[in-house]
Amino acid sequence: MKQNTLLSPSLFLAVLALLHPLDSHAESSPAATAAPRGATDRAGGLISKAKKSENGEPAPLQTLSSNPAANPSLTPTAKPNILIILADDLGFSDLGCYGGDIQTPNLDALAANGLRFTQFYNTARCWPSRAALLTGYYAQQVKRDSLPGQTSGGKGVRPVWAPLLTELLAPQGYRSYHSGKWHIDGRPLENGFTHSFEVGAKAESNYFKAEGNQTDGTPSVQTPDYYVTSAVADHAVSCLREHSERFPNQPFFQYVAFTAPHFPLQAPEVDIAKYRDKYLKGWNAVATDRHARLTQMGITHHPLPAMETEVGPPYAFPQQLAVLGPNELNKPLPWEKLTPGQRQFQAAKMAVHAALVDRMDQEIGRVLAQLKTMGVFENTLILFLSDNGASAEMMVRGDGHDPEAPMGSKASFICLGPGWSSASNTPLRRHKTWVHEGGISTPLIVHWPAGFQARGELRHHPGHLVDIVPTLMQVSGAQKPAKIASEKVPSAPGHSLAGFLEKDDRSLNGHLWWLHEKNRAIRAGDWKLVALAGGEWELYDLSKDRGESNNLAKSNPVKVKELSELWEKDLEETIQLQKPNPKKPL
C-alpha cells in the first residue's frame, strides 16, 4: 500500500498558492412515533425539549451537572470539542485543497494540518443528508427520505428511537449549539440544542433577507448590510463566546450549517469582483484544469468524464427559464458553441458561485479565530463537509428575478445550471439528486491536532454521512441506550472513522446504499451498481473509473445480479423497519 503522506503543511499551502494565488482574507491565529418531536421525554436520559432557567435563558441540556466540581472527569482536555461545518450544494472540486480555483485559504489550512477524504459520500439531497449526518441512519430508515408505501420523505417524522447526535452527547457533558439551515423534522431547541439561529424559508431564497430567520425563537432584524452567511457565523461566534465565559470546563458541539453555495446565486459585490472575468475560459477548460490539479494532488486517478451535453436540470421549469433571458442555458453545451453574450452571462454566474464559496470560507475563518481565542482550537475536532454535490437545478423562487438587476444582487435569482455544476463536480459525473458520483461524493476535511498526528494527508477509505455519529460517539465516549421510550434501538449502518485518522485503509466495511427519487445505487468494495429512475442497472469498477464512463453491466451480469439482490434486500429490510411492531399475544 502506498504511503499517504503528501506534503508538509507549509509546503502544501505553498503548492496551493502556486496553483491559484490566494487572497489575504485568511484569519490570523490569535493567542419513531407519529407524535410531534419533543412532545414527550425519552427514556435513558435523552432530552426532548429545551428547558428554561428561571431568567428564561436556555439551561444546560446535558444530564450531568454543569458544575465542574460535580463532574471531576470533565476537564478542558478530557473530551474533544466538536465543530461540524456543513456546506450546501458544494461541488467536489470547488475548494482549493480539492483542486479548485476559488480562494478558500481557511479550509485549505485545515486540510494542510489535517486530513482530506477522497471517497466520502452523502445522500444526494439536503434533508436526507442532514438526517443521516445527525442520526447515523440512512434517511429512509428514519422516514426522512421516500420509501414505497410509507409516509416518509421531506415531511417525514423520525421514529422515537432515532434521536439526534445532541441527545447522545448530552450525558457526556456536551452543550450543543446550532447556527444556520435546519431542514430536519422538529425544531432545534426541541432536539438537544441549547441555542439555535435558524435560517427560514424566505432567507433560503434570498441571502440578503433577515425575514423568517430567528434566534431561539426571536425574529432576526433586517439591517442594510445583512447577509445570511455572515449571520450564521455571527451566531456561531456568539455561542462559542458564551460557552467560554459560562461553561469553560464543559465540551461543546457546535453545528454550523451554511446555506452557501445553494441557489439563488447571491453574494456581496466585493466578493464577486474577485472573480468577474475568471471564468470566461468556460466550463470545459475549468473542468480540465481542476482535473489536472486533482491528479497532481493524488486525489484523482481516473480520466475526466465527458460532460453529458444532453443532460439538463433534474426538474423542468420552462416558463421560469424563459424569465432568465436568451443567454441562460439548460444544457452543458461545448463552450465554443456559445454566443459571446451567453459566454459573458455564464461566466458571470460562476463568478457569483465562487464568491459564495469565498465568503463562506471567510466566515469560517472567523469561527476558527474564535476557537483560537478561547484556547480550544487544538482539541476541537473539526469536520467540514457538504450535503450533496453541486446542483444542476434551474428555477426562480422567492421574490423572482429582475433581468435588469446586477447579477448576484438581492433582486436577481439565478442558479448554477448543468454546465457549471458539471465543472464544480469535477472529476465526477452528474449532479445533486442523482446517485452517480457527482451527486453523492463531496469533500470531507478532518482537523484535530490533539487527536491525531497526521498532517496534510489523504484518506482513500470510503466513508458516508452515517459514519459521522459513530465516529463522534467513539471520540466522546457517548453510548446509545438499548431502548428509548420502550422501543428497541435498531443497529445503525455506519462505522467509526476514528481508526482511519492515523492510518488509511482503502477497503470498505460492508456496503453503502442509496435511494433518492427512484435513483438507486449500491457500493460494495470497488464495485458500484447505479441506475437512473426507471432505468437499467449500470456497473462500474470505481478503482479505475470513478467518472463512471465504462459501464460493465453487460460484461459482468453475475456481479449485477449479486449487487442488485443485495440492494433489494436492504430496501425490504428498511421497509420492514417502518412497520409497527406486532403486538404480543395475550
Image (tube, helix red, strand yellow):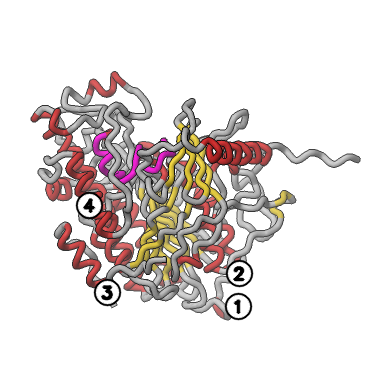
Is 382 placed left or right of 128 in the picture? left
Residue 190 locus on image (x, y percent): 55, 50
Residue 418 locus on image (x, y percent): 28, 34
The residues tagged by marks 2 and 4 sit, at their Cα atoms, a distance apart of 52 Å
In the rendered view of the protein, which quadrant contains the N terminus?
bottom left
Q: Nearer the viewer, mark 2 or mark 4?
A: 4
Residue 542 locus on image (x, y percent): 42, 47
| Residue that appears at 30% across and 30% down | 394
Q: Which residue is mark 2?
A: 64
The residues tagged by marks 4 and 1 sit, at their Cα atoms, a distance apart of 56 Å
Q: Which mark is residue 103?
A: none
**Quarter residue 66 falls in:** bottom right
| Residue that appears at 19% across and 67% down | 14
Q: Which mark is residue 30?
A: 3
Q: Is residue 369 visible?
A: no
Chain part drawn in magenta? 419-438
Task: State which tag comes first along the sequence, 1 or 2.
Answer: 2
Q: Nearer the viewer, mark 1 or mark 3?
A: 3
CB within 8 Å, label 1 to label 2 = yes
Q: Which mark is residue 70?
A: 1
Q: Which mark is residue 292?
A: 4
The residues tagged by marks 1 and 2 sit, at their Cα atoms, a distance apart of 8 Å
CB within 8 Å, label 4 to label 3 = no
| Residue that appears at 57% across and 57% down | 51
Q: Amino acid at mark 2?
A: Leu
Q: Secondary structure at mark 1?
A: helix
Task: State which tag comes first along the sequence, 1 or 3.
Answer: 3
Q: Nearer the viewer, mark 4 or mark 1?
A: 4
